[in-house]
Amino acid sequence: MDRFLIKGGRKLSGSVAISGSKNATLPVMAACLLPQGKSILHNVPHLNDIKMMAHVLRVTGARVDSYDHTLEIDSTHCSFFEAPYELVSKMRASIYVMGPLLARFGQAKVSFPGGCAIGTRPVDMHLQAMEALGAEIEIEHGYILARCKKLQGAEINFDKISVGATANALMAAVLAEGETTISNAAREPEIGSLIDVLTAMGAQITGRDTDRLFIRGVTSLQPAVSSMIPDRIEAGTFLIAAALTGSEITVTSCRPEHLTSLLEKLLEAGLNITTAADQIIIQPGSSLKAVDIVTLPYPEFPTDLQAQFMTLMCLAQGNSRIEETIFPDRFMHVAELNRLDASITVEKNIALVKGVPNLSGAQVMATDLRASAALVLAGLAARGETSIARIYHIDRGYEDIEKKLQTLGADIRRIRA
């Protein structure tokens, strides 16, 4: 397995362009199964998760071609309704094909999903949404079997907010007969992006950016041409990298309005932030102050930036409290950060971080996507050399992260296995 070798303590400078959003692209790729014909997606990041989803779509009979950050997805000849275990087990987002396949063909067979091991993430709400729309669900030999004659509009009330379940319900409801209401829907920018693409295909959806969505089903959809939104988590990761290393950088090709909660916390921590239409300039302040965060659904602080922000707090003056409410077990990076001489203790779903003067390089191991990003950030700030193993996790969600960091002046190398 490849690993990263980082010599820390170097200042960063310059600008970095943010890639398209992985978390926005994956459900949109699945949505391309809804119309018959070729849809085109621009600003698609080169990531392993995107490649894996492309394989899932090909299994259903779609043709997927990739070139220059563009995907062409032709669903004209889709006829196979299964997303197999060997693909779905590697990436949780594969569950997104269930709604489109059920809506268009009346049946879907999807393996239980895999992905990052960051605690229990059941698919119950996905299945409840499909059942509310009239699907019959069976669980057999590790597969979800969903069937219907024709989906019917319904009232879908989620007990808690789920981005994945909201996306799947949306994609199923757009071709259902009648009207559907989704209450307690996710408001993340990635859901807004999906709504924009579905609307471009001819879907009738109102309530964008609210927690209550209204869908009037249509009989068919048309292929669309769309551009993926910037990856707010990648943008946030680079901002935190600058804050950790006391550097000034400019993050371009981003949407500052998608990062309001993070920017507020960086300002509170003493950083200087300047925003424009599609860029953010971050500069060090006089000192780095400890601040508390609580992860909550958008527009509050995102769980996907919790590990990175915890790394920042390791070098802050004072003590900080980090409460994880989305995935209570998402603290596997703590032990690895402590190997770098951080001072972090965990009590249930709360991490208590005592700021230290310095981090020290060591050998560490990535355990999931965002934890691996946190370790890279820690390595940039640590004294000495840090070796990070199992970096295949980071390749799932960050496009050419070492090359982008090298452009900013970081001393980071990928060591091939």
Image (cartoon, rainbow, N blue to C red):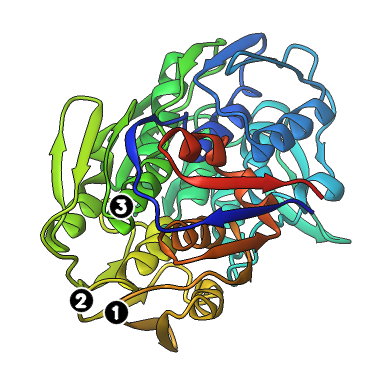
Q: Which residue is depicted at the point 68% across and 36% down?
A: 102
Q: Nearer the viewer, mark 3 or mark 1?
A: 1
Q: Which mark is residue 355?
A: 1
Query: Which tag, 3 or 1, sits closer to the chain's start?
Result: 3
Quadrant in which the N terminus appears? bottom right
Give the residue type at disc 1: Gly
Instruction: Tell me the SS state at disc 2.
Output: loop
Query: Which tag, 1 or 2, sits closer to the chain's start?
Result: 2
Query: Which tag, 2 or 3, sits closer to the chain's start?
Result: 3
Can you give x and y, in whole percent of width and height, for residue 138 in the image?
77, 57
Contact? badges 3 and 1 (CB < 8 Å): no
Can you give x and y, in whole percent of width and height, for residue 97 in the image?
67, 37
Closest to the observer, 295 or 382 = 382
Q: Which mark is residue 298?
A: 3
Closest to the observer, 330 or 31 = 330
Give the residue type at disc 2: Gln
